[in-house]
Image: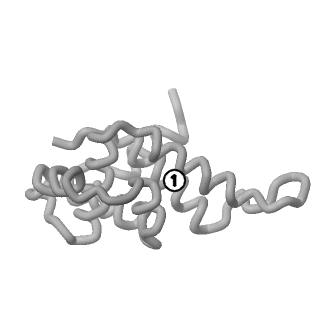
Amino acid sequence: MLEISPEKIAHVIIRAREYDSGVNAWAHNGQRAGHGTRAELAEFIAGLNDDEKASLVAVMWIGRDTFTADDLAEAIETAKLEKRSPTESYLMGEPQLADYLEAGMDALGISPEAAEDDLQHPV
């Protein structure tokens, strides 16, 4: 069972896309602000509990075709057992993080678009 909310995964996807695309790359004072997005993403991932981190890694692996959706429990357990570096460093080192997370959510039957819309249009 996935131990992270779709909204938290969507938050990582949105921030990873912003970081990758350079959105908000320049602050109002003309200084480069891209590090703010990177730092925010790293802090968000670091702030997740261990179960959420393992689930996030598992979703990325499923999106990358390292595991199938049917192997979710095994992927989560493997993520817990094989953790060697901070999760934020591992995930942010993956150039296609947002794409893999979206593909993983899709494979698990979770709509990444709906979760992203919920974040961007709060009720």
Rendered residue at 54%/51% (across/down): 41
Q: How many numbered markers are drawn? A: 1
Rendered residue at 41%/61% (across/down): 91
Rendered residue at 14%/64% (across/down): 68
Query: SS at mark 1?
Result: helix
Q: Quadrant of residue 65?
A: bottom left
Q: Amino acid at mark 1?
A: Ile
Rendered residue at 39%/54% (across/down): 87
As drawn, the residue found furthest toward the top would be: 123
Quadrant of image for the N terminus: top left
User: In the image, 23: left or right of 90?
Assistant: right
> Image height check: is 21 above or below 109?
below
Q: Quadrant of residue 4?
A: top left
> Image height check: is 100 above or below 44?
below
* Camera-side residue of 78 and 73: 78
Kindly identify which residue carries mark 1.
14
User: In the image, 20: left or right of 103?
Assistant: right
Q: Quadrant of residue 31?
A: bottom right
* Camera-side residue of 23 and 115: 23
> Image height check: is 54 above or below 63?
above
Colour mapping used in the image: one colour
As drawn, the residue found furthest toward the front would be: 84
Q: Position of residue 112 (x, y in %)?
A: 36, 52
> Image height check: is 76 above or below 25?
above
Q: Position of residue 79 (x, y in %)?
A: 23, 55
As drawn, the residue found furthest toward the right would be: 29
Q: Position of residue 11 (x, y in %)?
A: 47, 46
Mark 1 nearby-residue class (10 Å; few <14, some 14–19, many ≥20): some
